[in-house]
């Protein structure tokens, strides 16, 4: 049964035992806005008490991706126009939804097919059963705009093997489906041409088999991730105490990709890198996702209210598109002794939870 109009940005319907939520902005790779977050939240609240809905499935419309992230153009407009209260309201709603998905009383299955980045990872990465495909391209690319990973991304990054969390958090690099399973961002690899059959099985399979067992019927072993071959130099470099020392170790390493990684880090916002390094390491010691989201909220609102690099990064990458951001400070060597401290200790006016 379909509950949404064709124009809705979230398609809501029930099929057998399955409650389906499909992000419906394919022209924007299903980028999240406030209304979509509210609609998903309201529906999950309602389905919590609907005995006909036994499993929830979250996916995205179209072939390009599940969700490219949040609406950063809208975020830029809110900040420069002084509407930071709206920004805070959006982040609080989004992070509450991330926590709801993680703690939901019924199994939530997510399909991160195609591009799934930023806010998309917040929807997909905390579910009970997380599916990727051969088309999946996952990332937390916030440092590319002078920002820091959020939506529980630091929680996921901090639990990746070795120092892959620091590597993917700082570089914003993409992972394929096999990488995502290896790093703990996904559980199952299902070829995209089997997704329709999987959805039908989740909706109409009559026996009491649980959703995890159903997914296993469609799960295949992907080509192995190439990441283990890089773990040596990544662990060595990204275990350093500071961003400057990470770059120094990369420069001294003879691994084929080490120098290019150093070049990339030196092109990104020094403050965003330092805050991200601090956030991933803080999350590694935290007890749960909610605690990590609280740490992210402090840092995100510090960027919104106290630091210019987020606005500058969005301007350079997405507004003016000159690809020539003026970071503050401009270089890693100019960072303070505790560059993540101000963001770590920032206290937003309204609490997250």
Image: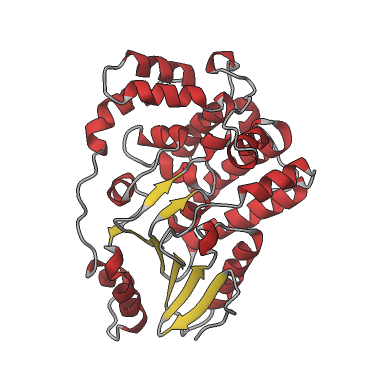
- Count of labels in the image: 0
Q: Is residue 48 visible?
A: no
Report the coloring of the rendering.
secondary structure
| Residue located 67% across and 40% down the image | 301
Q: Residue furthest right?
A: 82
- Compared with residue 307, is residue 208 higher up or lower down, i.e. above or below? below
| Residue located 52% across and 83% down the image | 2
Q: In the image, residue 23 lies at what x, y percent?
A: 52, 66
* Lateral position of residue 288 relative to residue 91, left or right: left
- Compared with residue 74, is residue 142 higher up or lower down, i.e. above or below? above
Q: In the image, residue 306 lies at what x, y percent?
A: 72, 32
Q: Which one is in front, 38 or 70?
A: 70
Q: In the image, residue 284 lies at what x, y percent?
A: 44, 37
- Compared with residue 292, is residue 56 higher up or lower down, i.e. above or below? below
Q: Which one is in front, 14 or 108?
A: 14
* Lateral position of residue 213 relative to residue 292, left or right: left
| Residue located 62% across and 58% down the image | 33
Q: In the image, residue 133 lies at what x, y percent?
A: 31, 58
Q: Quadrant of residue 79?
A: top right
| Residue located 80% across and 43% down the image | 82
Q: Quadrant of residue 139?
A: top left
Q: Is residue 206 visible?
A: yes
* Lateral position of residue 280 relative to residue 260, left or right: right
């Amino acid at each position: 049964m379909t509950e949404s109009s064709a124009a809705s940005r979230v398609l809501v319907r029930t099929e057998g035992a399955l409650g389906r939520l499909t992000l419906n902005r394919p022209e924007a790779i299903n980028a999240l806005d406030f209304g979509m977050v509210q609609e998903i939240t309201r529906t999950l609240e309602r389905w919590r008490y609907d005995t006909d809905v036994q499993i929830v499935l979250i996916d995205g419309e179209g072939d390009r991706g599940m969700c490219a992230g949040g609406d950063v153009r809208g975020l830029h407009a809110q900040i420069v126009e002084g509407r930071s209260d709206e920004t805070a309201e959006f982040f609080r709603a989004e992070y509450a939804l991330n926590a709801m998905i993680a703690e939901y009383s019924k199994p939530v299955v997510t399909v991160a097919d195609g591009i799934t980045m930023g806010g998309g990872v917040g929807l997909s990465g905390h579910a009970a059963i997380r599916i990727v495909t051969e088309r999946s391209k996952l990332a937390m690319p916030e440092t590319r705009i002078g920002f820091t990973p959020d939506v529980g991304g630091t929680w996921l990054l901090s639990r990746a093997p070795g120092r892959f969390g620091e590597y993917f958090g700082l570089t914003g690099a993409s992972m394929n489906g096999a990488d995502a399973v290896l790093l703990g961002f996904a559980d199952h690899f299902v070829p995209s041409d089997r997704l329709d059959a999987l959805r039908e099985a989740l909706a109409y399979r009559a026996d009491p088999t649980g959703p995890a067992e159903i997914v296993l019927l469609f799960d295949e072993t992907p080509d192995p991730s190439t990441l283990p071959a890089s773990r040596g130099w990544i662990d060595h470099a990204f275990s350093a105490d500071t961003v400057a020392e990470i770059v120094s170790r990369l420069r001294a390493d003879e691994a084929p990709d080490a120098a290019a990684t150093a070049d990339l880090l030196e092109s990104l916002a020094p403050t965003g890198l330092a805050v991200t390094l601090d956030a991933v390491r803080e999350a590694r010691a935290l007890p749960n996702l909610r605690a990590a989201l609280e740490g992210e909220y402090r840092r995100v609102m510090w960027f919104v209210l106290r630091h210019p690099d987020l606005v500058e990064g969005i301007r350079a990458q997405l507004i003016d598109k000159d690809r020539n951001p003026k970071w503050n400070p401009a270089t890693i060597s100019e960072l303070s002794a505790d560059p993540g401290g101000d963001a770590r200790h920032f206290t937003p006016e309204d609490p997250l939870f």
